[in-house]
């Protein structure tokens, strides 16, 4: 594979790359051919006789767009394939699909999937949109979930919003494998939301010590922390217990009630013809309760 690059106000061809790992980033011009005499071929580039051809406009346009995207190299089939060599032409046609990577390839190699703090930004929201650098929407967390699962190794259930408490400590930590953060400890601190815990941040303690503190904190949590508390069973009338209020509850309740007292047993309902003000306690000389079934809060 060869590439074009701008040099000295003109265009030159690179050496032929035999290893994919040696190929620098490049742009591709997808175009339709015009008349053969108007197109620019490999020999035209080598012999510097391309500026008067109609296709020179396409050549300059492709170079300008590549430069705008900070790319020094670009590929055009007419220029980068030796059309006179049947062997090279055959090889190029068989490799062309690989040479023209789709956005999916760039998506899989995105730096976004290598940063520590972006893990919680992927898992926490219900909806995540993925936008290209050109501002085009590539998809969302739902439509791209299979790609995201292959890139990150995160279980599909977690990507779909399942309670993260259903996944073990080791599995959740594995989701951060291969990711990086500027500060070493942030590789652990960025996982606090994943585990639903709070922990003091001590920069300088190192990743291993922070990891140890996180593990110790999680081991102290109740095993059913992530599960909802069971609803209490309703009691039957025969199981109802006498009403008992603490003194602190009494004080709070007394702000809303005209009488300040606490019960130790169920009080009989007064007759409709009598009010609480008609009832008198002969122990404290105050109205509102009776000594035989209520005890004065004093």
Image: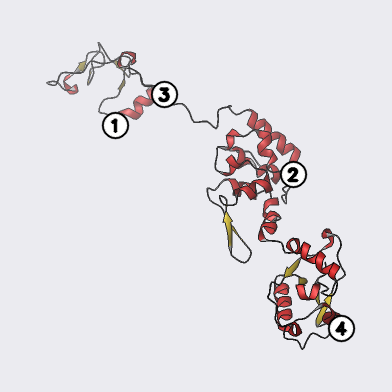
* Circle on res. 47: 4
Q: Contact (CB < 8 A) between labels 4 and 2?
A: no
Q: Secondary structure under badge 4?
A: loop
* Neighbours of disc 3 within 10 Å: few (<14), some (14-19), many (20+): few
Q: Nearer the viewer, mark 1 or mark 4?
A: 4
Label 1, label 3: how many angstroms apart (C-alpha)?
28 Å
Q: Is residue 112 visible?
A: yes
Q: Residue 129, percent across and down? A: 56, 55
Q: Contact (CB < 8 A) between labels 4 and 3?
A: no
Q: Secondary structure under badge 3?
A: loop
Q: Residue at x 55, y 39 (%)?
A: 162
Q: Which residue bears the numbered disc 3? A: 232
Going from N to C along the chain, the mark reached first, 4 or 3, is 4
* Neighbours of disc 1 within 10 Å: few (<14), some (14-19), many (20+): few
Q: Which residue bears the numbered disc 1? A: 256
Q: Within the image, what quadrant is residue 1 found in?
A: bottom right
Q: Secondary structure under badge 1?
A: loop
Q: Residue 258, percent across and down? A: 25, 28
Label 3, label 2: how many angstroms apart (C-alpha)?
47 Å
Label 2, label 1: how many angstroms apart (C-alpha)?
54 Å
Q: Residue at x 18, y 18 (%)?
A: 270
Going from N to C along the chain, the mark reached first, 1 or 3, is 3
Label 4, label 3: how many angstroms apart (C-alpha)?
88 Å
Q: Nearer the viewer, mark 3 or mark 2?
A: 3
Q: Within the image, what quadrant is residue 224 found in?
A: top right
Label 4, label 2: how many angstroms apart (C-alpha)?
61 Å
Q: Which residue bears the numbered disc 2? A: 204
């Amino acid at each position: 594979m060869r590439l074009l690059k701008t040099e000295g106000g003109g265009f030159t061809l690179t050496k032929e790359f035999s290893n994919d790992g040696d190929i620098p980033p490049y742009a591709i011009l997808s175009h339709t051919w015009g008349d053969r005499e108007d197109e620019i071929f490999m020999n035209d580039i080598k012999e510097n006789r391309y500026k008067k051809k109609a296709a020179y406009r396409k050549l300059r346009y492709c170079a300008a767009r590549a430069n705008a995207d900070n790319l020094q190299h670009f590929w055009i089939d007419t220029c980068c394939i030796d059309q006179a060599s049947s062997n090279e032409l055959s090889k190029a046609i068989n490799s062309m699909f690989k040479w023209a990577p789709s956005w999916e390839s760039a998506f899989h190699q995105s730096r976004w999937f290598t940063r520590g703090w972006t893990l919680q930004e992927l898992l926490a929201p219900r909806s995540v949109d993925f936008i290209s650098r050109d501002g085009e929407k590539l998809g969302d967390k739902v439509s791209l979930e299979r790609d995201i699962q292959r890139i990150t190794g995160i279980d599909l259930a977690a990507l779909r919003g399942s309670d993260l408490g259903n996944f073990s400590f080791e599995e959740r930590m594995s989701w951060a494998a291969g990711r990086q953060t500027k500060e070493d400890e942030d590789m652990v601190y960025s996982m606090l939301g994943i585990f639903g815990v709070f922990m003091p941040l001590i920069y300088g303690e190192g990743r291993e010590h922070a990891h140890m503190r996180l593990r110790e904190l999680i081991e102290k949590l109740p095993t059913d922390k992530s599960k909802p508390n069971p609803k209490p069973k309703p009691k039957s009338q025969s199981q109802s217990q006498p009403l008992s209020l603490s003194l602190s509850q009494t004080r709070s309740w007394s702000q809303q009630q005209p009488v300040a007292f606490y019960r130790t047993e169920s009080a009989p309902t007064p007759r409709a013809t009598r009010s609480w003000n008609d009832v008198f306690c002969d122990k404290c000389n105050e109205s509102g309760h009776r000594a035989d079934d209520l005890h004065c809060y004093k």
